[in-house]
Structures are given as C-alpha cells and as structure tokens.
C-alpha cells in the first residue's frame, strides 16, 4: 500500500546524516562518534517506517504509552531497534518503560532511580541510563540541578548500581545553547561519563562541536510536528 506521509523522510534523513558528518569532521572527531536519535514522538507508524526503510534504527519517544502503542508492532517488523525515552518518566510507568526502552535519558530524581533499580532487578534486565541535568536551573523543567549532580550520581552508580553512562540536557529557550552544551560536557568529564545527549533540530551542529555523542532530531527528519496528545501519559 502506498505511504501517504507527506514529508520526504528518507531524503531529510540523508541530508541530516550528511550535516552530522560535516560537523563531526569540522570538530576533528572520528566518524561514528555521534549517534542520531530520530525523535518519532507524535509521528504515526507510516512515517516511522519510512525512516526504518531508509536504515535508521535509533529512535526517541517522549511518552511511554504512545511508544508502546507504536513500537510493539514495529519491533516485530524490523530488527535491531534501539529505543530511547527522552521525555519525563512517572514512577508508575517505570515497569513498562524498563520493558520497552533500551535507554532512558531522563533519570532525574532519587525516587525514580530507586523504582527503576527495583524494576531492572525484577525484570532481570540492564538498560542504559542518562541523567537529565537542568543546566539552566529552570523551576518548571525536570532535571537534576548542577550542584546536586555529584550526590545523585553517587546514589545511582554507587548505591543502586545503575548503568549510568551519560548526561542529557535541554537548554533554556532564548539562551545561547553552546553555554549549556559546554557545561554538560565539562560535567561529563568530571564524572567520567562517556555519553552526552544534547542538541536538537535547531542546534545539533553546535552540540556536536561541543562534544555531543547523541543528537535528538525530530522535525529535521519528519517535518512539522504532529498534534501532541493531551493529558498525562
């Protein structure tokens, strides 16, 4: 059946991959050091299939229920999917999140860390975890404050033995993104973390030059964002 999704996903994906390659070269980094996370939140399965058919295998979703509704079927059709949770996680959705996702990028509070640790033990599973850092200290935004990061990492890695491999941030709107990317990079080096998830469609090239290992791109690949479902996840 013909796919009616209006955006040239394959063409956009190829363009983005080319731009990422240029940014990697210009920052004197090795090819393959930056992973593209295609942000498929709110986009329908037919759009995601276009990216999958073009070879993309790493995707990001914001909502646990939405992701479960799409990816349970898509994973039966395609191999080697790597699914990242990049939106806030409620503790009552942790069991499903641990089962569904390969990486949770939004670990941000002790209660959530403890619930995830218990679920990982229960499901006899290990997944990658990034700590979300609130680099702008915005009261309305999720994320660990910079001053609280050392003690939170000690809880996660020391007490709970979680597989925390990186940090994630979302710079404040209206501020220079590079300042926040540089801060996150410095924090990762201080704490011996190898992964940095930072940079979206508007600023991913800057993020790569600041050391990003993961960039999260949605509209640059899929076009204009679909209507976001209302209500809690």
Image: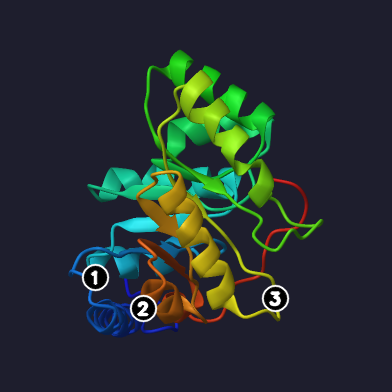
Disc ID at residue 9:
2
Label 1 close to label 2 by CB (< 8 Å)? yes
Q: What separation in Å lies between label 1 and label 2 (alpha carbons)?
A: 8 Å
Q: Which of the image's four quarters has the N terminus?
A: bottom left
Q: Residues within 10 Å of mark 3 (few under 14, many from 20)?
A: few
**Element assignment for label 1:** loop
**In-front residue for pair 154/226:** 154
* Percent x, y of residue 125: 37, 23
* Percent x, y of residue 158: 48, 23
Q: Which residue is the site of mark 1?
A: 54
Tell us which disc is closer to us: 3 or 1. 3
Q: What separation in Å lies between label 3 and label 2 (alpha carbons)?
A: 27 Å
Q: Residues within 10 Å of mark 1 (few under 14, many from 20)?
A: some
Quick check: can you spot residue 95?
A: no
Disc ID at residue 173:
3
Give the residue at x 44% y 79%: 206
């Amino acid at each position: 059946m013909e796919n009616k999704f209006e955006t040239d996903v394959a063409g956009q994906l190829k363009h983005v991959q080319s731009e990422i390659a240029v940014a990697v070269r210009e920052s004197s980094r090795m090819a393959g050091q930056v992973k593209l996370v295609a942000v498929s939140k709110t986009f329908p399965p037919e759009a995601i299939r276009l990216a999958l058919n073009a070879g993309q295998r790493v995707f990001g979703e914001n909502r646990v229920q939405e992701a479960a509704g799409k990816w349970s079927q898509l994973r039966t059709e395609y191999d080697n999917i790597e699914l990242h949770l990049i939106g806030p996680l409620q503790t009552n959705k942790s069991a499903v999140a641990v089962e569904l996702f390969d990486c949770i990028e939004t670990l941000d509070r002790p209660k959530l860390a403890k619930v995830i640790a218990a679920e990982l033990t229960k499901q006899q599973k290990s997944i990658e975890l990034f700590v979300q850092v609130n680099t702008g200290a915005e009261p309305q935004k999720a994320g660990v404050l910079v001053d609280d990061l050392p003690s939170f990492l000690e809880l996660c890695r020391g007490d709970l033995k979680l597989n925390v491999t990186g940090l994630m941030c979302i710079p404040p709107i209206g501020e220079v993104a590079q300042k926040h990317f540089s801060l996150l990079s410095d924090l990762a080096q201080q704490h011996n973390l190898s992964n940095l998830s930072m940079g979206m469609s508007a600023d991913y090239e800057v993020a790569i030059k600041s050391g990003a290992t993961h960039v999260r791109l949605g509209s640059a690949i899929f076009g204009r964002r679909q209507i976001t479902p209302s209500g809690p996840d």
